[in-house]
Amino acid sequence: MMAAAQPETIFEIKRSSIYFCRKAKERIQLGKGFFGVVFKGHYKGEKVAVKIVQDGSMNPQDFLNEAQIMRTMEHPNIIKLLAVCTKKEPIYIITELMKKGSLLEYLKKNRQTLDISHQIEMAVQVACGMDYLENNLYIHRDLAARNVLVGENVYKVADFGLARVLIKAPSDSPNSQYYRVIEGVCLPIRWTAPDAIVSNRFTIKNDVWSFGILLYEIMTFGMEPYANIKNNNKLIKRVTGGYRMPCPRDCPENMYQIMSACWMMQENDRPLFESLHTMLSDLQ
Ligand code: AMP
C-alpha cells in the first residue's frame, strides 16, 4: 500500500541555519508586534526578518498548515514567506526584510515629506496586493497600517493569515489593546466590519472594510481610528448604528468616497479589491 502523501515541508528549516545580526553582541531588533519580536538576520546569504512568536500564542501544527498556504502567495505587494521553524517553540517565521519597517511608523515619521501622490501610491499598491489575495481566495483578517511593510518605493502586505491561527492574545505586546478574543477568534475591533464582529464569520469583504480603515490611517498619517471613542463596546454600538468617521483633513473628496464605500453596512455593497485597485489607480 502506498504511504499517504505528506505535506511538503521543505521550508521547515533548522534554527541553526539562521544567523542573527548583532550589534555589541545584542541581536538587532527590527520591531515588536502583536505576534512577537522581529529580528534582523541572514538566511542562505539573504538579509531576512525573523519573527519569534511568543510561546503558546499559536498551535505549531495549525501554524504550519497555514504557512503551507501562505508560502504559495507570490506577488510584488505581498511579503514573501521564506521559511519557518515550527518543530518546537518558539516558532520562527522568516520573511524578506523590508528596510523601512511598518507603514504605520513610516506615516507617523514622514508626514512632513509625504504628499497626496505618495498616499495614493501606498493605497494603490496595497489594493494591488489585496486584489491578488482576493483572486487566490485568501482572507487576510488583520489588514491595517501596522501590518503593511515599506521598502524602497514599495509597500507590501504582511502578517496575512496569522490572526486565524492565533489562540491566545499575547498580553504584553504593543497594540494588544486593539485586539479582542471573541469565541476563540482574535479580532482587531477597530479594523473589523460590524457584521464580522457579530457573526464571527469572515469574508474578503471584511478585509475590504479594514482596507477602508487603512485608507483612513494613510490619509491621517497614522492616526488611531475612532480616536474619540475609547470604549470598544460603545464603538461597536455606534458603528452598527451607522456612525462612520468623517473625512480627514486635507483628504480629497474622491478618496473619502472610496473609503466610505468600504464601510457600507451590507457587505455585498462594498467593492471588491479588483475595483478598489482600479478606482485608486484612476486617482493617480
Ligand atoms: P509584526 O509582529 O509583524 O507586527 O512586526 C513588528 C514590527 O517589526 C513591525 O512593526 C516592523 O517595524 C518590524 N518588522 C516586521 N517584519 C519586518 C520585515 N519583514 N522587515 C522589516 N521590519 C519588519
Image (spheres, rainbow, N blue to C red):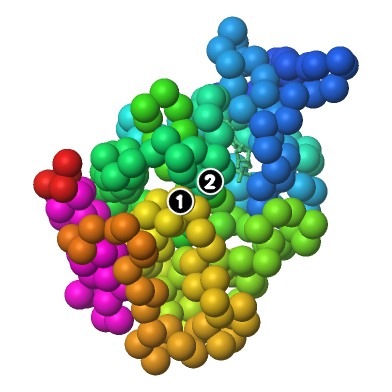
- Seen at 54% across and 71% down, the residue is 227
**Are the residues flagged by discs 2 and 1 in contact, CB closer than 8 Å?**
yes
Residue that mark 1 sits on: 221
Quadrant the C terminus occupies: top left
The residue lying toward the viewer, choosing from 152 and 75, is 152
Residue span colored magenta: 255-280
Q: What residue type is labelled 2?
A: Lys
* Along the line of sight, the residue nearer the viewer: 219 or 192: 219
What residue sits 64% from the left and 15% below the top?
Answer: 42
Q: Is residue 253 magenta?
A: no
The quadrant of the picture showing ligand 1 is top right
Residue 22: percent from the left, percent from the top? 78, 17
Residue 131 as seen in the image, left or right of residue 72: left
Q: Residue at x 35, y 74 (%)?
A: 246
| Placement of 22 over or under 228, stated as above or below | above
The mark tally for this picture is 2
Q: Which label's residue is closer to the chain start, 2 or 1?
A: 2
Q: Is label 1 in a helix, a strand or a loop?
A: loop
The residue that label 2 is drawn on is 108
Q: In which quarter of the image is residue 232?
A: bottom right
Residue at left offset 68%, top offset 38%: 31
Relative image position of residue 251 (x, y in whole percent)? 29, 58
Which residue is most to the top?
Answer: 45
Q: What residue type is labelled 1?
A: Phe
> Residue reaching furthest right?
25
Q: In this view, does 250 lie above or below 262?
A: above
Q: Which of 52 and 277 is in front in this view?
A: 277
Q: Distance between the residues labelled 2 and 1?
A: 5 Å
Residue 130 horizontal side relative to residue 89, left or right = left
The local crowd at label 1, few if under 14, some if 14 to 19, many if 20 or more residues have their Cα within 10 Å, is: many
- Residue 229 appears in view: yes
Quadrant of residue 266 in the image? bottom left
